[in-house]
Image (cartoon, rainbow, N blue to C red):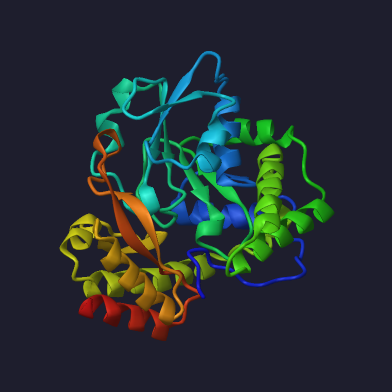
């Protein structure tokens, strides 16, 4: 069964470049902007807030209403007290949910906040320039256990942030192997039990405490721009095919205006749980681990309207015949 995360079962992890420059160079060439690598997207957010001097005792951050506490809220809470959007705050986490860009541009609301951080964990392949720092999460688009980055607008800020990050402790490789094995065991299990869930909690806590990039992650990332572009091409083809196949009008409207391949694909937006379950069952039968998630139907963080939706994996490790079968299901559903 294919999950939302591209995963390859591995027992051993080779060490890549300790500096991470090959991967950083590829990303800088792709985005045409300065990039600093981290052990995770969460680590990038928390370290960046720390670097800028924010404190939860003095500053607040507005986060989306449906944000999972274990994802980002725990990462930001040490450096900014989280409040639910649209509460007034010092910082806004501008969230591109599941890879679908906000319909209200961040530049239209930047005067309300001292800082806007663009959370692009679900929209890696968006190459449009942004006025704001962008957070990337590798594990949602590549078969790696962890990894993240921040895209900046200034070489000077990049150098300062990189120097600040260099002062942080680094995990030794044996510890990296341990948390990577936890990660791959968790995501390869059909139904992770309590032990695997507890292991993953430990792994995430360790990665967040050690924000410097992990060598074992960097070795599994694209080392050449051509490799990255090839993955983008496959995901774009999959997304375009599924987008052309979907017939549910609410899903079609939700997708409208999205140009870049998202993290997951919404095939059905409905309150009817029976219809959702029927579609999930059909997708499971062809090997896709579809689930019900809640999407902001407005795609407007400051005026959100969350609805249940069936979302479908659409990453590059899924064979084309399965994606084609998923499209046929959507066309006839």
Q: In the current view of this chain or complex, which residue is farthest to the top?
A: 58
Q: Quadrant of residue 22?
A: bottom right
Q: In the current view of this chain or complex, which residue is farthest to the front?
A: 274
Is 10 left, or right, of 276 in this rendering?
A: right
In the rendered image, the quadrant that contains the C terminus is bottom left
Residue 98 visible at all:
yes
In the rendered image, residue 77, in percent from the top left (x then y), is placed at 55, 28
In the rendered image, residue 220, in percent from the top left (x then y), is placed at 65, 64
Q: In this view of the protein, which residue sits in the foreground, 125 or 306?
A: 306
Residue 257 visible at all:
no
Q: Quadrant of residue 248?
A: bottom left
Is 214 left, or right, of 150 in this rendering?
A: right
Above or below for 65 versus 246:
above
Q: In this view of the protein, which residue sits in the foreground, 106 or 333?
A: 333
In the rendered image, residue 96, in percent from the top left (x then y), is placed at 37, 46
Q: In this view of the protein, which residue sits in the foreground, 146 or 159?
A: 146
């Amino acid at each position: 069964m294919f999950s939302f995360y591209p995963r390859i079962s591995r027992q051993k992890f080779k060490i890549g470049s300790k500096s991470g420059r090959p991967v950083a160079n590829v990303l800088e060439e792709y985005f045409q902007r300065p990039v600093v690598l981290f052990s995770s997207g969460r680590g990038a957010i928390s370290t960046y807030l720390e670097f800028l001097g924010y404190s939860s005792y003095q500053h607040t951050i507005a986060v989306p209403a449906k944000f999972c506490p274990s994802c980002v809220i725990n990462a930001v809470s040490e450096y900014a007290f989280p409040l639910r959007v649209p509460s007034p705050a010092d910082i806004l986490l501008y969230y591109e949910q599941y890879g679908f860009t906000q319909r209200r541009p961040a530049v239209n609301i930047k005067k309300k906040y001292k800082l806007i951080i663009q959370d692009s964990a679900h929209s890696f392949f968006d190459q449009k320039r942004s006025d704001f720092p962008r957070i990337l999460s590798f594990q949602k688009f590549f078969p790696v256990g962890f990894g993240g980055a921040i895209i900046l607008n200034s070489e000077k800020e990049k150098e300062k942030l990189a120097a600040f990050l260099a002062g942080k402790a680094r995990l030794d490789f044996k510890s990296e192997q341990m948390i990577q094995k936890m990660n791959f065991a968790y995501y390869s299990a059909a139904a992770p039990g309590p032990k695997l869930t507890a292991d993953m909690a430990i792994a995430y806590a360790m990665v967040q405490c050690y924000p410097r990039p992990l060598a074992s992650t960097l070795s599994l990332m694209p080392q050449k721009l051509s490799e990255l572009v090839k993955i983008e091409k496959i995901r774009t083809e999959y997304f375009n095919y599924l987008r052309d196949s979907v017939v549910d009008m609410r899903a079609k409207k939700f997708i409208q205006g999205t140009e870049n391949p998202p993290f997951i694909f919404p095939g059905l937006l409905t309150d009817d749980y029976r219809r959702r379950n029927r579609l999930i069952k059909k997708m499971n039968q062809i090997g896709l681990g579809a689930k019900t998630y809640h999407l902001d139907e407005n795609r407007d963080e400051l005026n959100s309207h969350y609805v249940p939706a069936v979302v479908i994996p659409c990453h590059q490790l899924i064979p084309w015949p399965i994606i084609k079968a998923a499209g046929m299901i959507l066309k006839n559903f």
